[in-house]
């Protein structure tokens, strides 16, 4: 009897642990972020990547947008927007505060009216096949 109860408890604990470890809601998103240069890229990507739950953040200087992979169970797009704005960079939803922006290096002080191409698609590489 004790062996059956112990076996049942171990089974339930194992099952519970396996379900809790498999919970993940990885998703992808893109949004606009203003910036100018390689230093901007480093700062913007670091601000996003430092958030628990963000697995990838790549800022596209040409299109002024960031492509993200993140776990929606650990973070939200609002938190990511706020972290980037707190580092001095406007996103398409959250503006950086003036003091933080003014403390950016001169090369990073972007035009506050610059367009962000938030609907830009990544260029596909078609070199490996004929069209």
Image (cartoon, rainbow, N blue to C red):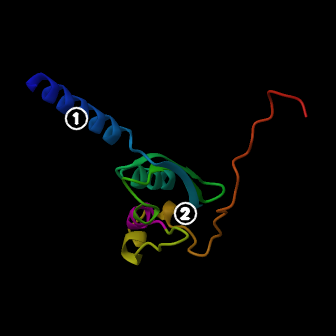
What residue is disc 1 on? Answer: 13
Q: Which residues are magenta?
A: 80-89
Residue at the extreme right of the image, as rendered: 131
Residue appearing at x 63%, y 66% in the figure: 116
In this rendering, does residue 68 appear at all? no
Secondary-structure class at tag 1: helix
Q: Residue 72's spot in the image, x, y percent?
A: 43, 54
How many numbered discs, if any? 2
Residue appearing at x 28%, y 39% in the figure: 16
User: CA gap, disc 1 to disc 2?
Assistant: 45 Å
Nearest-to-viewer mark from 1 and 2: 1
* Contact (Cβ within 8 Å) of mark 1 with mark 2: no
Residue 62 versus residue 10 in the image, above or below: below
Q: In front: 1, or 110?
A: 1
In this rendering, does residue 1 appear at all? yes
Q: In front: 18, or 78?
A: 18
Residue 17 versus residue 26 in the image, above or below: above
Q: Is residue 62 magenta?
A: no
Residue appearing at x 16%, y 25% in the figure: 4
In the rendered image, which quarter is residue 123 located in?
Answer: top right
Q: Earlier in the sequence, mark 1 or mark 2?
A: 1
Q: Residue 63's spot in the image, x, y percent?
A: 66, 57
**Which quadrant would the N terminus be assigned to in this image?**
top left
Q: Is residue 58 left or right of residue 116?
A: left
What residue is disc 2 on? Answer: 33
Q: In front: 114, or 80?
A: 80
Q: Is residue 86 magenta?
A: yes
Q: Residue 129's spot in the image, x, y percent?
A: 84, 28
């Amino acid at each position: 009897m004790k062996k059956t109860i112990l076996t049942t408890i171990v089974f339930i604990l194992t099952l519970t642990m396996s379900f809790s470890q498999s919970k993940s809601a990885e998703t992808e998103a893109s949004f606009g972020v203003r910036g100018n240069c390689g230093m901007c890229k480093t700062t913007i990507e670091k601000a996003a990547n430092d958030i628990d739950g963000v697995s990838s953040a790549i800022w596209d200087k040409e299109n002024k947008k960031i492509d993200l992979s993140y776990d929606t169970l650990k973070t939200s797009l609002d938190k990511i927007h706020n972290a980037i704005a707190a580092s001095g960079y406007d996103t398409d939803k959250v503006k950086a505060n003036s003091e933080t922006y003014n403390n950016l290096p001169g090369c990073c002080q972007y035009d506050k009216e610059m367009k962000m191409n938030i609907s830009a698609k990544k260029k596909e590489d078609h070199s490996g096949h004929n069209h």
